[in-house]
Amino acid sequence: MTLNFVGRDILSAKDFTREEFDYLIEWGQKMAADQSQASPEFVNILQGKVLASLFFEPSTRTRLSFESAMLRLGGSVIGFASGDVSSTKKGETLADTIRTVANYADAIVMRHNLEGAQRLAAEFSTVPIINAGSGAGEHPTQAMLDLLTMKSELGTIDGLTIGFAGDLKFGRTVHSLAYVLSNYDVNLYFISPKNLPMQNRVLETLMSKQVKYKIGNNLQKVIPELDVLYMTRIQKERFADIEEYEKLKGAFILHADDLVSAKEEMIVMHPLPRVDEIHPSVDETTHARYFQQVKYGLYMRMAILGLILGGLK
Amino acid sequence: MTLNFVGRDILSAKDFTREEFDYLIEWGQKMAADQSQASPEFVNILQGKVLASLFFEPSTRTRLSFESAMLRLGGSVIGFASGDVSSTKKGETLADTIRTVANYADAIVMRHNLEGAQRLAAEFSTVPIINAGSGAGEHPTQAMLDLLTMKSELGTIDGLTIGFAGDLKFGRTVHSLAYVLSNYDVNLYFISPKNLPMQNRVLETLMSKQVKYKIGNNLQKVIPELDVLYMTRIQKERFADIEEYEKLKGAFILHADDLVSAKEEMIVMHPLPRVDEIHPSVDETTHARYFQQVKYGLYMRMAILGLILGGLK
Amino acid sequence: MTLNFVGRDILSAKDFTREEFDYLIEWGQKMAADQSQASPEFVNILQGKVLASLFFEPSTRTRLSFESAMLRLGGSVIGFASGDVSSTKKGETLADTIRTVANYADAIVMRHNLEGAQRLAAEFSTVPIINAGSGAGEHPTQAMLDLLTMKSELGTIDGLTIGFAGDLKFGRTVHSLAYVLSNYDVNLYFISPKNLPMQNRVLETLMSKQVKYKIGNNLQKVIPELDVLYMTRIQKERFADIEEYEKLKGAFILHADDLVSAKEEMIVMHPLPRVDEIHPSVDETTHARYFQQVKYGLYMRMAILGLILGGLK
């Protein structure tokens, strides 16, 4: 099967089909295999191509992941790591910034604190736009790498029971991942504090696609049923009442002890950075996969850039 | 005709002859043609060369333009996007910074808020210095790309009537462009608020070279005569009296309606970023060229780097 | 002689033997010779390799030096120039940041304001860590390039009399250089204000290795004996009493006049940036070597990266 991704924007996980996700997984796995060779085959496929990396909001992981992916395929990178050094400080509109940068680059990867920023950018850009995180909206390439992680670590997506825990309201990675998983035959659990529930627009999409999901706030009770536990951060700033935060926080911190009831094969994932929500004791268990997830991120972004820029066929 | 630019500094538009500008235009056009090919010829001519990109003042456009140009010719880039991360914060002199960086790079492109900074740098550097904007002084490579834009879009420079509108006192791009155009047979109009007139030092150069120019403050009246309208920003900070600013601002904002009296072939240019001074309605007219100008910027900087670093002959 | 540096961390100058330093000098000199060729031999030996350049504390010299070294060997670079844009701002631990970045890069060069940071990083990293400056602790690659400078400029290390002047308490470069030199047959002078003496842990190492050293605070008196005068900055912030600072400062500023009593071959070095401590008049003397030192820095870092990443054998 060959699908054509050349020139395509990556704005939302909702814009892709199951067939397309499977195709991305396939290429992500090819990248993993290729990189483990002494002489990787794809080392020069993007020679002469330039990626613009526009991070209006800082990021270590996503930015360095995309940049390393581009460089490992022989391409090069321009951009900025903080909106402070961009012309938007001089009052330039985002549309003008994008129309400008599209003249210098073959694709633009962009993080922005406003949800619709990437879609607006795509309207004005002559080159593909990749959404690297949009406010509390989406983070589609994170969801794609999460999918690659599950498939590679567990061998399947269909049939999995996947729990999301933490801040499901503002966590853009869980929104995108829920959209991605809605294309598969999965059972979902959404476990969050009451004031940080999964957003209705996501639940509506799941219902329309007849995805089975349950909602709760007791992480401990759910753990034995899960194949995947996807943890996210709960940010203090989300709570008006600091006592409320302190009270809830503990219920969403995972310790190694909490995993004694878990299935043997169950894996714990996290988009990182973590702060308190996964205790270091979990790192030593056989369940931890959040650092491997980072590596799958590199491979998935290599696949995405290779396909969009026409280097992989 | 072959001119030798190897190792040459680009400090001021005054340092170049008409023959040299024509040569740069010629190479800029070759770069444009080459980049539109499936397999560009010049993709590796700067392999092994390193450009230091030292932006003591932030910039999106100029910095990314130079960096993309260098990378597209097979070279690589080191540097900083803001003076905050440089050793000048520790009290190092500019001379010492330059003497240091000249050991790491084959050329240095530099933006600085002080006018004489690049000329000082050139005194201490063992590698070529390219001025990427010096305070309210000059921005010579912008003027070179403006020249390439006019020549490519209108077929000639000689015979053109070119209007400059906006802040002509502090706008470094218009200073450099006026110097460049003083080598051609052109008619210039300088249209600005009374407190922001074209600088005397520029007018003196024009007079000494017998360039025809007129001065005014009524943009509307001049438009029908122009082949090129070169707009620039008026910055609020330049006015002691904010009411004065608000009153004048309107007279230097261009709308699509203002262009009904323009010649059919007339083009509107702007060094960007624009804030209010060109209304988005102008973008849709056949006169707008400010985004194409960005692309010519990439080609001109490829030509400049290729020639200075000995990759083009 | 062939030593194996592949995959090795560079954390402290104390971790290396004389044989290893000599090997590094040898490769640094090969790099110098290679770079002076029209077609350098080593231009592509790190193709496909990625260096992560993590500067939690800003730096011009060390960062650009490492990045230029990597690029000149055909490798590429990702990273950040300031901790402000990293995920540590979101509360991520250094251990997690390193575990993440180690997935994207083949080596990590890192500057941090805390002394133990690089050693901690090395515990969590799957790729080599290079210490590019750790608080008031060490700066081992600076010491290696200082050694290359002395050897290349004076032909030997054994037998040299070397004076260190300035802030010897907080100056990390002098700590590392003293450790390096403790492997050779040298005479050391430590000349500093009374409140900024060489640290005891360094002196203890020297004693245990039977290195001859003297301590004093009169720079003028010592100059005639020296083969190398290694100057460092005295930072105002180190003094509780500003009058004390002003009084002492003068005694640690070097003028050309101070060098009339120096041996003809004596060289003046400085890790840079300098502020006041070397007067510009010294730049014109035959003793000044601090800018050549910068160039040796590039060569030494090329050697280090080439050896650690397996490109040089």
Image (tube, coloured by chain):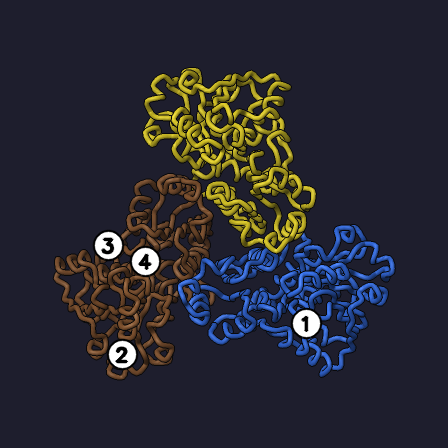
Chain colours: A blue, B brown, C yellow
Determine whether, in the image, residue B69 is placed left or right of residue B253.
right
Residue A181 at what x, y percent from top left? Answer: 72, 73
Q: What element does badge 4 sit on?
A: helix
Q: Is residue C48 above or below residue C190?
A: below
The residues bearing labels 1 and 4 have C-alpha atoms spaced at a distance of 45 Å
Name the residue tied to disc 1. Answer: A21
Q: Residue at the spot x=63%, y=38% of the render?
A: C116
Counting residues from the N terminus, which is met first, the one under dot 3 or under dot 2?
A: 3
To the question of a shared chain for discs 3 and 1, the answer is: no
Name the residue tied to disc 2. Answer: B265
Q: What element does badge 2 sit on?
A: loop
Res. A233 in view: no
Name the residue tied to disc 3. Answer: B16
Inspect the image, locate mark 4, and give the three-letter code of the amino acid beneath it: Thr
Determine whether, in the image, residue B154 is placed left or right of residue A118.
left
The numbered mark at residue B141 is: 4
Q: What element does badge 1 sit on?
A: helix
Determine whether, in the image, residue B208 is placed left or right of residue B7.
left
To the question of a shared chain for discs 1 and 4, the answer is: no
Inspect the image, locate mark 3, and give the three-letter code of the amino acid beneath it: Phe
Q: Chain of mark 2?
A: B
Res. A258 in view: yes
Inspect the image, locate mark 1, and give the three-letter code of the amino acid beneath it: Phe
Q: Residue at the spot x=45%, y=58% of the render?
A: A85
Quarter of the image for residue A95 reads bottom left
Counting residues from the N terminus, which is met first, the one under dot 3 or under dot 4?
A: 3
Q: Residue at the spot x=78%, y=77% of the render?
A: A212
